[in-house]
Each structure stands twice: as C-alpha cells, then as structure tokens.
Amino acid sequence: MQSTDSNSTGQAGPSDQASSFDRAGLDDFIAGLPKAELHVHIEGTLEPELMFELARRNRAPIPFASVADVRNAYSFTNLQDFLDIYYQGAQVLQVEEDFRDLALAYFARAVQDNVRHTEIFFDPQTHTDRGVPFRVVIEGLLAAGKEAKTRWGLSSKLILCFLRHLDEAAAFAVLSSAEPWLDRIEAVGLDSSEVGHPPSKFERVFARAADMGLRRVAHAGEEGPPEYVEEALDLLRVDRIDHGNRALESETLVARLASTAMTLTVCPLSNLKLCVVKDLAKHPIPRMLRSGLCATINSDDPAYFGGYINDNYRAVAPLLGREGLATAARNSFVGSFLDADATAVQLAGLDRYLEGRG
Ligand SMILES: Nc1ncnc2[nH]cnc12
Ligand SMILES: [Zn+2]
C-alpha cells in the first residue's frame, strides 16, 4: 500500500522545533480546547481491563493471560491484523449492561478531554452474528448516552456501521433490524476491511438508508485507493469521509473535496499503528488543511491505538500549531450532525475559549 505521508512539500516551520516550553503550552491549549469527536468505534474503546472484567462476568473465554498480554498483542502491520484482534475482543460484550458500561467508560474519558459532542460508530453485525440481539446492543448504548448527557452535559449520536467484508444482504438485514430505533440513529457508516470491498458493493443499502432519512458516512481512502473515495461520494452520497488519506493522491479529488467542504475524519495515531503513515512527523494533516480540506482529529479505536482524542491532537500538535489545532476543532463542530442551533452554541464556546487565550 502506498503511504500518504506529507512529503518534502509538506509543512515545515518553526513549530517543528517546538521547545519543551511551547510543548507544555500546546498540551495545555489542547486540554482546554472544546472539541467534537466524529470518528470513534465504540468497540474500539474496550480497554483490556474492562475486557477482563466482562470476560469474568460473562464467563467468556479470552485468549490472553493478563492485561499486559493483551497490550503486547497490539502490534499491527495493517488494518486486517488489527481487525482480527478487535473482533475477538468484542466477544466479551454479551448483555445490555456490557454495552452500557463500555460506552459510559468512553464518554467519561471523552469528557476528560473536553469533548463536548461525540458521534460514535457501532458494528451490530459483530454482535448479532454471534447471537446477541440488536436490541441488547443499541439499548445499552442509548442508556449510556442518556446518562452521559445528564451527568456531564455530553451530547452523543449513534452511527450504525455495516461490515463491508460481509455481503449486501447482511447489510440490508441489519438495516431492517434497526427500524424500531430509527429516530435514535443518526447515520449509517461503512467499516472493516477496505481493500476488495469497494463502496459500490453497498450502493443499494445506502440508497435505502437515505430513503429512511439517515445520513451517511463511509471509511474510504484509509488503505483503499482514491477511486473508493470517489465511489463513496458518487454512489453512497456520503456526508463525511472517514480517514480519506489516500484522496491526496488525486489532485482533482482534493479540489472536489475542498470545494464541497467535505469533512474528513482523520485519525493520526490509528494511521501510525496501522502503518498508513510511517512517521507522525510526516502525517498528511497539515497538507490536508493547507489544501483547504475540512480535516478533523479523532481517535478511531483508542484502546487499541494507544490514545484518546487529546493524544491524537498532541500527536500532530508540532505540525499544526495552535492555529491548525483550532481549525481542526472548529471543523469538528461544523462537520458534526448537530443541528444549526447546537452547532452555533458549540462554535460560540470555542470562540470564547480562543479569545480568552488570544
Ligand atoms: N480503522 C478502521 N478501519 C476500518 N474499520 C474499522 N473498524 C474499527 N476500526 C476501523
Ligand atoms: Zn474507523
């Protein structure tokens, strides 16, 4: 797979040589920066400690002897390497309370990072295919969402993802099971093994989802070619592109994404862990922003990739400086599925924060 690191034309400048004093200032700036998270798989927030706890509660076998053993297994050379371990880990999730505990732990962690709004992916087929009813999954997640709103004022939305390595019929089936909860699902998404499973495979499912009033997002251009990003735009009629790194290989596509203000949900630490980029110092996000792309910063699968959203902001902070980080935070609210009033409230909060620091 071709890597899309920024190259010699990528951003370089004084921020690259940030002193330890600047670094501390940047960390502080990131900690207080209001932000939305738009790309996080709830199953990817399963920390090894909770995995063990749920395995014990449910008497479910896991192929690890200790938490340290689990963390040692988290070394990946590509997306599939990771997915094999990730689907295995999810098997400890069995009853409604498990899904509630999982999501509540993530929401609590997100609040610590000053996340004001989050849109979480869930993969129903990972659970329904092993006999866990759709109702158990979604009711657990919705209960956690309500609790997070009451306890911390955190707003959240759900994005139901289809596993693209499975077939169209299976995606239609999961969409049908979701019907009783349609008013509490914001969007559909497309995830799992990208290469060999182009967006075109799900064109009819996404058309049905659109008819049902759902928004649409899709992972595209993480490992797959720029043509997959084009298919997601043209055939799935997506509102956001998840990742989108390889879009940078096509100038025409970059111009199209910029002129349509398409949001990209970029995940720096995920890109590093899955070898989509070789080196964080060459992460393409500065180039994306300079090209006018509406890039945001997100954690993807934080329990597996070694960091939550602020770790991801910190990972690219030397490349972006305060201005770039603030742009990414602004893009996160603008690119969210919040309505216009709620978006305006969030943007006003962000502006107050930035003015207070100006
Ligand atoms: N980074 C990723 N890409 C595709 N599918 C995923 N499922 C969980 N994380 C994913
Ligand atoms: Zn993802």
Image (spheres, helix red, strand yellow):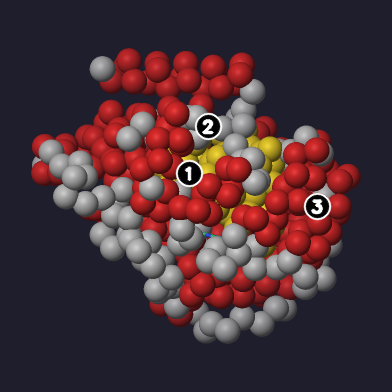
Disc with the residue nearer the chain's start (3 vs 2)? 3
Task: Tell me the residue at 26%/59% (across/down).
Answer: 279
Which mark identifies residue 265? 1
Task: Tell me the residue at 58%/42% (across/down).
Answer: 233
Disc with the residue nearer the chain's start (2 vs 1)? 1
Q: Secondary structure at mark 2?
A: loop
Q: CA distance from mark 3 to mark 1?
A: 23 Å
Q: Nearer the viewer, residue 82 or 42?
A: 82
Q: Is residue 27 positioned above or below 271 on the image?
A: above
Residue under label 2, please give it. Answer: 335
Q: Nearer the viewer, residue 358 or 282?
A: 282
Question: Quarter-wise, where is residue 10 in the image?
Answer: top left
- Give the x, y percent position of residue 280: 27, 55
Residue under label 3, please give it. Answer: 175
Q: Is mark 1 within 8 Å of ligand 2?
A: yes
Disc with the residue nearer the chain's start (3 vs 1)? 3
Q: Nearer the viewer, residue 168 or 107?
A: 168
Task: Tell me the residue at 73%/73% (across/down).
Answer: 58
